[in-house]
Image (cartoon, helix red, strand yellow):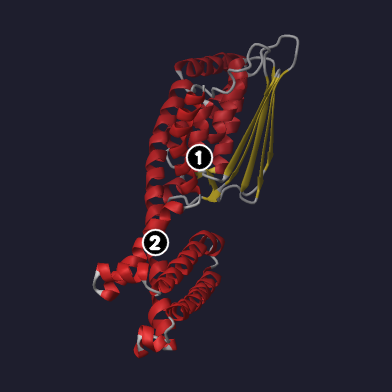
Amino acid sequence: MTGLSSSMYKSTFPTRMAGWFQKYKLHHIPFWIGYNYLWWVVAMGNPFTAANNILFTPLASKFIFYLVFQTLAVYFNLYYLIPKFLEKGHFVTYILCLLATIAVTASLIVPGYHLGAYIAGMTLDELYGKANHNLIHMVVGGPLSSTIAVITLAMSIKLTKNWLQTRQRQQALEKEKLETELNFLKYQFNPHFLFNSINSIFFLIHKDPDVASASLAKFSELLRHQLYECNDHEIPLSKEITYLENFIELEKLRQNENIRVTFELESTGTEPLGIAPFILMTFLENAFKHVSKHHHEPNWIDIKLSLTGQKLDFWIANSTSADGNGEVVNYGGIGLKNVRRRLDLIYPGKYELRINDEPGHFEVHFTVMLEIVVLNQEAQIA
């Protein structure tokens, strides 16, 4: 047992260390050491002379001051100033804070020159030369210019990395969108659904022509939305709501069951906001698919949709049969895991999904921050 525990510890230790290094960005340290060393090589013209000065002379203090304070300035800019000001559109505040960070960093590096002279027991003139230790050179010629250079380099690397990640996420989203559309066409608008809907409308033609006409119009709008209006990454929220309403009416007609459906809509002015197609429909279709089929007890589906600013709050709950629990999270064949993955791709960090599965009751609460959608001219005309 001791040997087994020891071997397991040895096998997991590198993984844990790698995670620790990743969390605290410690794997960046060799990069910044190499970056600063390269500047010393350029300045001194010889890699061995640069290494000797850094390792075995009082100039090491100057190197350490450059390394530590410029690295801190880089991460202060990347992980505080940019998220807090630049990404939120506060450009003037960001520029002022960045300039202040550069000035403070350059000022903090200057004592490294004096510390090196103190350790060596020499004056600044003797250690650096008269032309290399004056105030203008120590602040502007060295620390200030190199701090600007290192922050510019770090921002370039960060922006390039973000661009590559965004591109990869967009490609994954395109693939996921195609797979999701195929799944919905297969599981939701399958021949069984189409046949029952058309068949119900056919019998209504003789029983109640007005209701049949209205149902046929809803059925037409449903197919039109499915085939033509949901091909973009985002569609107007108002159209998605109309789609949900049409689907509810057709499902009530198609199932012809004792199901009470309520749909509360608390939103106005939804036209400027867009939402990815099939997001809300996923939960609605699941509710109709797995709603209880009791003969002597109520069968119900309750839906609430509210909009506060750009925050969409969608809540849906349905009654379930005692033997139906465990299946209601499959969402028309695409699976809860796939639903969450698609939401992670479309709305990373902008949504919350809570699911409550209890005996006789299944509930989904979905909130998301929407963005204003820009419609092309053809969509506006349609």
Estimate the x, y position of residue 317 in percent, counting from the top left.
68, 27
Q: Earlier in the sequence, mark 2 or mark 1?
A: 2
On residue 32, the disc is 2
Q: Nearer the viewer, residue 149 or 225?
A: 149
Question: Which residue does the numbered mark 1 point to in the structure image?
Answer: 344
User: Residue extending furthest front?
Assistant: 121
User: Residue extending furthest left?
Assistant: 46
Crowd rating for badge 2 (residues with CA inside 10 Å; few <14, some 14–19, many 20+): some
The answer to whether residue 121 is above or below residue 328 is below
Is residue 136 visible to the viewer in this orientation of the structure? yes
Rendered image quadrant of residue 154 = bottom left
* Amino acid tagged 2: Trp
Crowd rating for badge 1 (residues with CA inside 10 Å; few <14, some 14–19, many 20+): some
Q: Residue at x 42, y 47 (%)?
A: 378
Q: Nearer the viewer, residue 175 or 113?
A: 113
Rendered image quadrant of residue 33 = bottom left
Q: Residue at x 58, y 18 (%)?
A: 327
Q: Is residue 159 left or right of residue 76?
A: left
Estimate the x, y position of residue 75 in percent, counting from the top left.
49, 61
User: Residue extending furthest top?
Assistant: 295
Q: Nearer the viewer, mark 2 or mark 1?
A: 2
The answer to whether residue 343 is above or below residue 61 is above
- Dot 1: what SS? helix
Estimate the x, y position of residue 166 in percent, counting from the top left.
41, 49
Q: Is residue 171 left or right of residue 23?
A: left
Q: Residue at x 64, y 51 (%)?
A: 309
Q: CA distance from mark 2 to mark 1?
A: 33 Å
